[in-house]
Image: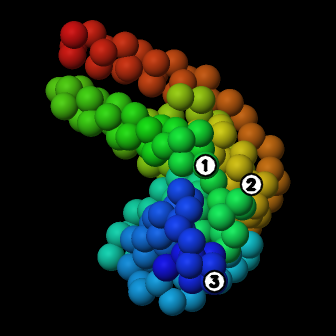
Amino acid sequence: MDPEYQRTGTVRPKSDLYAFGIIVLQLLAAQPPNGLLFKFKNAISNGSLYDILDKSIPDWALAGTEEMAQMALKCSELRCRDRLDLETEVLPFLKKLADMEDGTLRIQRNSIQPPNHYSCPILQEVMEDPYIAADGFTYEHRAIKAWLERYGLSPVTKLRLQHKVLIQNHTLRSTIKDWRSRATSSSG
C-alpha cells in the first residue's frame, strides 16, 4: 500500500503507481512484497540482479529486465512527487515493450526463422548493430556497451574480460539485414 496514503490518508493519482511498481518487482522475483524494494536496489547497485530474479525463468534478458526493475523502483518511490509520471514515462515505456514483443511475434509468424546467432545473448532479440566483445561473442552494441559500463565480466561465460574494446561485426550485420528484408517481403 502507498506509504504516503498510509501516512496522510489521501489518495493521489500516483498512489496506484506505487502498487504497480511493487507488483512488477513481485513478478520479476516471484516473491512476496516485503523487502523487495531494498532487495532490488541492492541487487542493481551490486550488479547481482540475476540472483534475485525468478529462478523458474532460466533465460532472463538482463538488460531489459534491469530497465523494467529500474522503472518499477521509480514507480515505488516513497513520496508521490518522486514517482514517475504515468502518461509521459510509464505508458511510453510499456508501449515500447509491447512494440518489441509485436515485432518479435511478427517475425516468429513468418516461415523464415532467424538463426540463433542473430540474437544478442544479453537482450535475446535479433541484433541490429552487432559488435564483437573480448570474449569472442557478438552482442547488440547498445546492450554490450551498457553491460561493460556496469560489469567487467563476459555476459556469456561470466569470466573477466581482458579488455573492453568492441569491434563492429559488419558481416553479421549485413547477413541480418538481408534476413530481415527476406522476412519482411515474405510476410507482405
- In the rendered image, is residue 161 in sight? no
* Residue on which the image places disc 2: 148
Foreground residue among 38 and 133: 38
For the residues bearing labels 1 and 3, Cβ distance under 8 angstroms: no
Real-space Cα distance between discs 2 and 3? 41 Å
- In the rendered image, is residue 188 in sight? yes
Q: How many marks?
A: 3
Residue found at x 54% / y 48%: 86
Image position, residue 148 (x, y; %): 74, 54
Q: Earlier in the sequence, mark 2 or mark 1?
A: 1
* Residue on which the image places disc 1: 85
Foreground residue among 185 and 5: 5
Instruction: Give the secondary structure at mark 2.
Output: helix
Q: Nearer the viewer, mark 2 or mark 3?
A: 3
For the residues bearing labels 2 and 1, Cβ distance under 8 angstroms: no
Real-space Cα distance between discs 2 and 1? 30 Å
Residue found at x 43% / y 76%: 26
Q: Nearer the viewer, mark 2 or mark 1?
A: 1
Above or below residue 171? Residue 127 is below
Q: Quadrant of residue 185?
A: top left
* Residue on which the image places disc 3: 7
Instruction: Give the secondary structure at mark 1.
Output: loop
Q: Earlier in the sequence, mark 1 or mark 3?
A: 3
